[in-house]
Image (tube, rainbow, N blue to C red):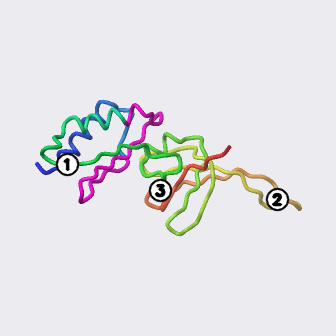
Amino acid sequence: MDFKSKVKGLLEEGLAEHPELFLIDFSISADYKISVVIDGDNGVVLQDCIDVSRSIEHNLDREEQDFSLEVASAGATAPLKFPRQYRKNLGRNLEVTTNDDNITEAKLIDANEDFITLEWKAREPKKIGKGKETVVKNAEIPYISIKKAVVVISF
């Protein structure tokens, strides 16, 4: 078994012990720097990173292969990649860039395995009479149409 396969197996075992956590990114550089990025249904705390790190590090032999290991959380400003991340952020505002470079900032109201549903308010001309009225708009966006989506942090 090659080094990457062994590390990947250990990582999967570590995540299996914490079903609320899931893998966002995993890589091993040419100089054996292992980089793991995780997220969790309820966020990620330092202890989660320590637990995943230990599940890998304690089962590898540095005499066999020297390596460095970094386990981190995805971070608040990291782009969303997986449906599970979208579901975790229901009710929050997202900035979504689609493949045709259309940018929408709206509230995430639903996320399933195929698409997300956004909701926002817009001012549009009244159907009858002069002036504008506020209307609630919705859009379903398939994941394959999303170039980038990030949570909008507001203070």
Residue 121 in picture, x, y percent from top left: 71, 51
Left or right side of 137 for 9: left
Crowding near the residue tagged with mark 1, few <14, some 14–19, many ≥20 C-alpha atoms within 10 Å: few
Q: Are marks 2 and 1 in contact (CB under 8 Å)?
A: no
Query: Sequence-wise, which precedes: disc 2 or disc 1?
Result: 1
The residue that appears at 59% across and 41% down in the rendered structure is 91
- Which residue in the structure is indicated by mark 2? 126
Magenta span contains residue 43: yes
The residue that appears at 25% across and 39% down in the rendered structure is 56
Crowding near the residue tagged with mark 2, few <14, some 14–19, many ≥20 C-alpha atoms within 10 Å: few
Query: Sequence-wise, which precedes: disc 2 or disc 3?
Result: 2
* Three-letter residue code for mark 2: Lys
* Stretch of the chain drawn in magenta: 24-49
- Which residue in the structure is indicated by mark 1? 66
Query: Sequence-wise, which precedes: disc 3 or disc 1?
Result: 1
Which is in the foreground here, disc 3 or disc 1?
A: 1
Element marked by disc 3: strand
* Three-letter residue code for mark 3: Pro
